[in-house]
Image (cartoon, grey):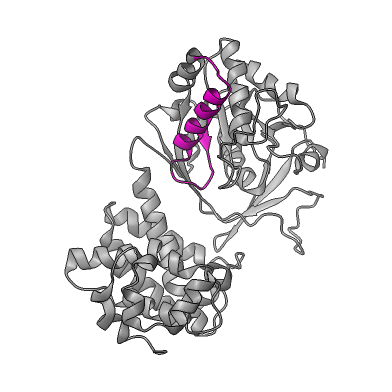
Amino acid sequence: MNFEKKIRPERIIQFGEGGFLRGFVDWMVQKMCDKGVLDASVVVVQPIEKGMCDMLSAQNCLYTHVIRGVEGVDKTLVDVISRCVKPYDDFEEYLKLADKEEMRFVVSNTTEAGIVFSSEDKITDAPPKTFPAKVTLLLKRRFEKGLRGFIFLPCELIDKNGDNLKKTILQYADLWNLSEDFKNWVEKENVFCNTLVDRINTGYPKDEDLNLGYEDNMVNTSEFFHLWVIETDYDIEKELPFSKADLNVVVTPDKLQMYRTRKVRILNGAHTSLVPYALLSGLDTVKSCIDDKTMNEHIRKCVYDEIIPTLDLPEEELKSYADSVMERFANPYIKHYLSSIALNSVSKFKVRVLPSILEYKKRFNTYPQTLVFSFAKLLDFYRTDMTNDDKDVVEFMKKATIPEILKNTELWGEDLSDLVCEVTKYADKF
């Protein structure tokens, strides 16, 4: 493919070269650049020893991002990654990123296990093992150069990801006896945002021809839906004008927890209230449930009639989000197997569905019958051999009576004996 790559100033450091960041952050940067509201490029840092940077570099850091859904197919050629840096091959090249005055943002997706502290990391390691230790050395270099700090936008799927990253960096500052001036600079001159990301990324499409007309070994795919909630007091739109490129990014000083609750209760809650019933009925994917009249009605009643009334965001916003969730579930390009969602269903039900049942009872003085039915189907499901959970949980659920199960505070965090009659009327395997 003959393509003249635009040269843009390097302003974003990105830890991670996997499909998610390339199909989420880099795609957004591309959209802003294409709209002419941003002039910036991304330097990708490979956070671990083995990764895909060589493959990306082999095609000049160009790749195609293909979005697919019921709306159709949309292809974007992404050219905003300027280069890849591999700290394990050339640590000095990595540290030099701190010397560039125009560097402003640090984004990352180093998995849920990425933001961790290890007392094994030494200040002399080149590089140290953990992601926060690598960042601490980058910040130390920048501080010593007398430059302004960074804005951190971590995408790791953990609660308070920005706060946790800052806390871990300061732990390294203590471990390595770095100066109080440095610690104050980290606190005052850098912005650590908590973020919530939401997009199903389906990665490299094996066994499919996307009709690109050229070879692309780093092609990436995702759904249309995308949401990035960024919690900060800082005016981030001034430097990253998401709204001017019509991107679904919410910048809020204090509402991230509400959006997290919305996602957990509606999207994850819909999955968890559906899966046992659907598997007992012989279905295998989320899409097959949407296509099945009975399951479709069940999931809609759960979400629109019983989950939404328990949440505090504006009703129109909640309904709009629920509509987008239903569209995502209907996406013919996403094969989301119920068996994979069924993993650890008891603990998932406790976090994702039970709060909606209890909040509904608190608000309306009656139990939500469709969610209670789902609860009964969960108990029925654990009477089968289809479960995938902790051995002790499976054994207990298989042998115990409904009253014994519901009063088990270890499973549910509280005694649910008040639900015994409600659940019993829908349970078939007791």
Up the image or down, 7 lies above or below 389; here it is above
Residue 397 position, x and y percent, is 44, 78
Up the image or down, 318 lies above or below 136; here it is below
- Magenta-tinted stretch: 153-179
Give the image quarter of residue 238: top left
Quarter of the figure with the N terminus: top right
Name the residue: 41% across, 64% down.
269
The foreground one among 81 and 261 is: 261
The foreground one among 421 and 299 is: 421
Up the image or down, 243 lies above or below 384; here it is above
Residue 169 position, x and y percent, is 53, 29
Q: Does the magenta segment cover residue 78? A: no
Query: Which residue reaches farthest top?
Result: 146
Up the image or down, 101 lies above or below 335; here it is above
Quarter of the figure with the C terminus: bottom left
Residue 293 appears in the rendering = no
The foreground one among 210 and 297 is: 297
Name the residue: 65% across, 16% down.
99
Report whether 172 appears left or right of 237.
right
Residue 236 appears in the rendering = yes
Query: Which residue reaches farthest left?
Result: 365
The foreground one among 183 and 361 is: 183
Q: Does the magenta segment cover residue 158? A: yes
Name the residue: 39% across, 67% down.
411
Residue 176 position, x and y percent, is 58, 22
Give the image quarter of residue 10: top right
Residue 49 position, x and y percent, is 75, 39
Counting labels gives: 0
Name the residue: 61% across, 68% down.
335
